[in-house]
Image (cartoon, rainbow, N blue to C red):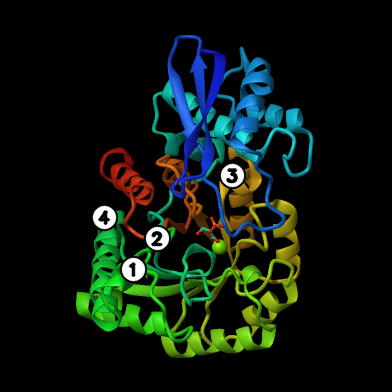
Amino acid sequence: MIPISKIKARAILDSRGEWTIEALVTLSDGSTFPASVPQGKSIGSYEAHNVSAARARRAIERIISPRLKGENPCNQKAIDGILISLDGTPQKSRLGANAILAVSIAVARAGAAYLDIPLWKHLRTIGRFRTPHAPPRLYINVINGGLHAGNSIRFQEYLVIPRAKTIVRSIEIGCAVYRALGDYVEKQKGASARNIGDEGGYAPNFTDDLEPFRAIRAAARAAGFSQKIDLGLDAAASNIEASEKSLHAVYRKMIGKYGLWYLEDPFGENEWEAFAALAKDQRVKTRIAGDDLTVTNIKRMMEAKLKNSINAVIIKPNQIGTVTEAIRAVRFAKKAGWLVVASHRSGETNDDFIADFAYGAGADGIKLGAPARGERTAKYNRLLEIERFEKK
Ligand code: 2PG
Ligand code: MG
């Protein structure tokens, strides 16, 4: 065992030019392992709390580092347990979920390096996950609206979900549709329609909620991949002012006209019954996913299960604050029989942990934004690296 000797931290920029935190865990042999954490914009009220980057740095260097000195970095659960009790608050508001998660991920990297295995395999062992039959499907956000863009689209993310057996093929399909969509919107709406939102998707003004799907379908036809994609939507409805009834009617249309395959946060974060009514009212089996509803928190996930609100779930490590708790959330979701989609945040860094997490946990999907902007492509490229060189 090579113990932890110190943990440093520094403020770095995220993809929106806001400060976030990077932790650097050093072991007694001098090797150092970094990790930085993303930040959301459409943040659920029940998520773990972040503190300012300056406060997170002080928490890491003054409180966490002395306590973890001498600990074994391979012992992820024990270290995460220490972090949770050091904080001692229900939403990690004392030390900050961002401070805690940065350390937790850097420790996972140190553990994997000591064991001389790829990070995704280390996470698979920690979670006692079986090797998945297939890699995660890609949930590619090609049109940005809501809080992620300054346009007329009220829903946050229009998703293309390629149907393919490998990451490389999924990326080929997704990128071809994404590029064709750029050409299509430019032709329809002028050159400025190519401008992109926070997650790299195009962000033109559309006339109604369904027009983005018409555009994606046209682009998929032009790219020759009409039969190779499913469509998804993250409504992020906690940020929308509309009645449950009117939203329900729009989703019915999307399901009827475009075979909507995946639908995330169709209603506000406390609308358990509205979720359940939609999940029940379906001839086409759309996957109804919780994000702000469930916030990677087992207590909220239990409630969703009890009320039959969802059959799919988003898992974001920074909604809960440690690697171990995020892994537990995946285990819970799998047991519940839900579709599991690991997800980035809209404010990202180049840290590619989420790719290893999705792969190691055997998630059904991974949501990463568009294949544009370095902080998004970092994750796609890490998935490619795992598939090409590390998969076994
Ligand atoms: C979401 C996320 C990620 P944000 O709602 O699913 O796409 O957005 O990080 O802004 O919460
Ligand atoms: Mg969401």
Between the residue at mark 4 and the residue at mark 1, the CA separation in whole angstroms equals 12 Å
Between the residue at mark 4 and the residue at mark 3, the CA separation in whole angstroms equals 26 Å
Are dots 2 and 1 in contact, CB under 8 Å? Answer: yes
Q: Which secondary structure, mark 4?
A: helix
Which residue is under mark 4?
Answer: 168
Q: Nearer the N terminus, badge 4 or badge 1?
A: 1
Quadrant housing residue 334: bottom right
Disc tally is 4
Which residue is under mark 1?
Answer: 163
Q: Position of residue 55 (x, y in %)?
A: 65, 31
Which residue shows up at 24% across the image and 61% down it? Answer: 172
Which residue is under mark 3?
Answer: 327
Q: Amino acid at mark 2?
A: Arg
Q: Amino acid at mark 1?
A: Arg
Q: Nearer the N terminus, badge 1 or badge 3?
A: 1
Mark number for residue 137? 2
Q: Nearer the N terminus, badge 2 or badge 4?
A: 2
Who is closer to the viewer here, 108 or 199? 199
- Please state, as top left, top right, bottom left or bottom right, where the C terminus lies in the image: top left
**Looking at the image, which residue sits at the far top?**
29
Q: Amino acid at mark 3?
A: Ile
Q: Is residue 283 above or below residue 1?
A: below
Q: Nearer the N terminus, badge 4 or badge 3?
A: 4
Mark number for residue 87? none
Q: Amino acid at mark 4?
A: Val
